[in-house]
Amino acid sequence: MADYSTQQRVMNEASAPPVRQRGWAGLTSFLNRDSTRGNVIQGLTLLFVLCLIVYLGSNAAYNLDRLGMMFGFDFLSSTSGFDISWSLIPYDPSMTYWRVFMVGIVNTLVLSFNVILFGTIIGTIVGILRLSSNPLVAQLARCYVEVVRNVPLLIQIIFWFTAVFSALPPPRRGYMLGDLFFLNNRGFYFPSPQGDISFFWFLGAFVLFAAAAWFLRRKAQQARINQTGNHKAIRTGWLVWVAVLVLVCVIGNGFIEWSVPALDGFNLEGGQYVPVAFGAAFVAMTVYRSAAIAESVRAGMESIDRGQHEAARTIGFSRFQTLRLILIPQAIRAIIPPLANSWLVAVKDSSLAVAIGFPELVSVFMQTSINQTGRAIEIISMVMGFYIFVSLTISYLLNKYNARVQYKVM
């Protein structure tokens, strides 16, 4: 009976509600909870950040008032009054600082996009070559990666600009191909379309046709995998896509005239050109970024078990089929996270092109515009906002794709 009574009392005490402690003991018990401690730390961190923002804002306001300056973005509607050496969108000195901001954004995005595209392609090839069974090819790829990765990017940009592109012959003795393409120490000249159709119409048409081609290709893959029998409709869709593309090209050709570059005195006139500063920055950044991407590809490929290679060879797959159908689809899950970081860094590295005079965002907006307007806080905040927005957009898209290709736990 005694044992039963003791057991019953212990069970009653365990099931009874906890006794609420008072005073210092109660406060200590409350703070020792994980949830409470986490909330307190988050609250203190938020308070510290807010206090820091208030302090920086008040300090900036005091200094601006002391210098007789005002904070605002009204300067964006003022005339810039300076020229920009190269721009993909129309610009002249009579336009506003807002237009200067847009010119810098477009030039930065064009440079970054080309570096990301070609850097990813070259890096993927070099990363695969590093795993080649041919020791010469593997060692050459390894030397490429090791040499490029261990030389600072800024030095590579200056090298390509001074030792390669600036050393090209002048326009009168430059290289040419079929009287259409010209390469000299001022840039690369090529024919360009001119007409009443806006560039944005070209861009919209290209995006529309690319989206339609992607949709038809995806439907064709689904029909081939699921054996749904929609092959005739898909072939009809491709025929319609080709017919509309040809029709648009024929109709658009009537509104377009081609401007071909030609030698006029000591320079080339007509057409479109890419300055040597763009070429040097593009080559240097592409080579540098491809080396980092190659290491990511190599690591992702080596994460696959060797049994996958042997199984593919056993069923008769060629090396290309093994890469395309077995190895790369599995390795992409390990490649995407470091690849996203490489893409983000490529966008931010474009600011180094200011060292050779390429008119990207930092050059035309953070340097020239600040020197003329004195609105350092506003201009720097706009440039920071642009880079943050682009970085978050790339990170979001690649994270969504990464989540899509990862293995799903059923």
Image: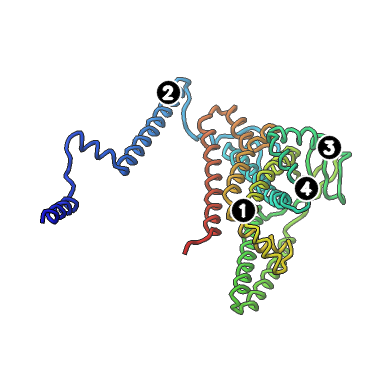
Q: CA distance from mark 2 to mark 4?
A: 52 Å
Front residue of this view, candidates 151 and 18: 18
Nearer to us of marks 1 and 3 is 1
Relative horizontal placement of residue 1, taking residue 270 as reference (left or right): left
Q: CA distance from mark 3 to mark 2?
A: 52 Å
Quarter assignment of residue 368 = top right
The amino acid at mark 3 is Leu
Q: Are marks 3 and 2 in contact (CB under 8 Å)?
A: no
| Amino acid found under the numbered disc labelled 2 | Tyr
Foreground tag (1 vs 4): 1
Pointer 1 residue: 303
Name which of mark 3 and mark 4 comes first in the sequence: 3
Q: Which label belongs to residue 271?
A: 4
> x, y (%) of residue 158?
73, 33
Q: Closer to the observer: label 1 or label 2?
A: 1
Residue located 67% across and 69% down the image: 241
Q: Which residue is mark 3?
A: 168
User: Does the rendering let one see residue 89?
Assistant: no
The secondary element bearing badge 4 is classed as loop
Amino acid on which the number 4 mark rests in the picture: Gly
Q: Residues within 10 Å of mark 1 (few under 14, many from 20)?
A: some
The residue wearing badge 2 is 62
Disc on the earlier residue, 1 or 2 = 2
Q: Nearer the viewer, mark 3 or mark 4?
A: 3
Q: Label 3, label 4: how many angstroms apart (C-alpha)?
A: 20 Å
Residue 150 screen position, x and y as percent: 69, 36
